[in-house]
Image (cartoon, rainbow, N blue to C red):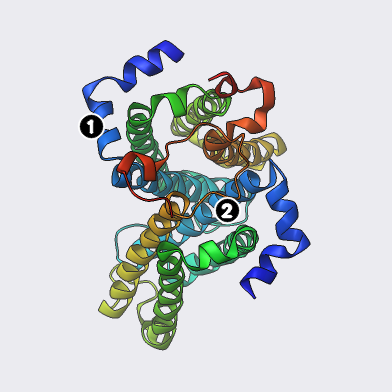
Amino acid sequence: MNQFALWLASTPPSVFIQEHNAWAIPAIQSVHIVGIALVMGSVLMIDLRILGLAWTDRTLQQTTRRFGPWLTSSLWLLLATGLLMVVGEPVRELVTFSFWLKMALVAIGAVVAVAFQRALRRHEQQWEGTLVHSPSIKALAILTFLVWVGVIFLGRLIAYDHVWGSWSPARRL
Amino acid sequence: MLEWLQRTSVAVQIRDSLFTFPVLESIHVVGLALVFGTIAILDLRLLGVASTDRPVSRLMSDLLKWTWAAFALTALTGGLMFSTNAVVYFHNTFFRAKMILLVLAALNMLVFELTARRTMDRWDRSGSPPRMAKVVATLSLVIWVGVIVAGRVIGFTATRSTVPAEAAPDVNFEDLLGLPEK
């Protein structure tokens, strides 16, 4: 991974970002934060609907139709800006424990988001009738919210990978 | 006053800990993501872009308690981070810009309360709220994006004396740009 990061850092797109890092990196990071904010807002609303704490005058399907597309497009925005950050600072991103743990959580969060929207479309009656009231679905709603909270923590910890002690590959650089 | 703040035991303990500052920063980002995420939903409703099938008042009662709770979390963690290096942050241009933007966000909210909000019972269910509401919503989105940008830049411009020396390798912008160390 170290070799790959160093190679990536020598490619023209990476060099371009490095040469303009004074504004490019904060700008990309800011868009990335706006993206995760839109994800958090959307996930919070759908989860609060499942918990019966908001959007109670709308069905789960209606609430998900309102926020699902925003959630999905924000995830694409995060992927695009995230890739730019990896290209711009490959060693800082890839040679950390936080980054890879974050990617694992992002994969879980994204799979849950897509699977949930699909399942809801296919089994609408079942969801509105019984599933939305089931304690395990409510627990899952809280859990998915916490997955995204974890993603934010790990995203920030990329800059502080030393908190992982000997698990952090950055220590050996 | 700023120097006293930096010397308080809370500030010293955060500075001396390897973990506390990164954790505070992470909570700060979670908080601001929820602040912006929920405000954006309301602003887009006021602009007539999304959630237009719901009354604005319903949306406000669903959203704003979460916005304020998240804001409290963000202000608390922000205050604690400020205390660790108060003198440097206070003199940082982007920190000042961020504080001015927060004041503007509050004034913008006040304008909404004094104008469009007063006639809300007339347009609560309307898909296209009055122009004043749209102006406030647009300004709100712009101001909050500005708060995020200014906040991120603080991290690149305030000297990182709070960060322990063992911190992960990071780009030194002053060196790369050939600027004198601040």
In three-dimensional space, the C-alpha distance between marks 2 and 1, rounded to whole angstroms, equals 31 Å
Give the camera-side residue of A75 and A168.
Answer: A168
Q: Which amino acid does label 1 sit on?
A: Phe
The residue carrying mark 2 is B28
Q: Is mark 1 on a helix, strand or loop?
A: helix
- Callout 2: few (<14), some (14-19), or many (20+) C-alpha neighbours within 10 Å? many
Placement of B65 over or under A44, stated as above or below: below
Q: What element carries label 2?
A: helix
Image quarter (top left, top right, bottom left or bottom right) of the C terminus of chain B: bottom left
The image quadrant where one finds the N terminus of chain B is bottom right
Outermost residue, right direction? B9
Q: Do labels 2 and 1 share a chain?
A: no
Q: Where is residue B125 in the image (x, y as percent from the top left)?
A: 38, 71
Residue B164 position, x and y percent, is 63, 41
Q: Mark 1 — residue?
A: A16
Residue B92: percent from the left, percent from the top?
45, 63
Badge 1, how many Cα within 10 Å: few under 14, some, many 20+?
some
Camera-side residue: B95 or A120?
B95
In the image, B112 versus A164, the foreground residue is A164
| Vertical side of B149 occupied by A77: above or below | above
Relative to B36, residue A25 above or below: above
Residue at 68% over, 51% down: B15
Q: Which residue is drawn at 33% across and 31% down?
A: A88
Disc number placed over residue B132 in the picture, else none: none
**Three-letter residue code for mark 2:** His
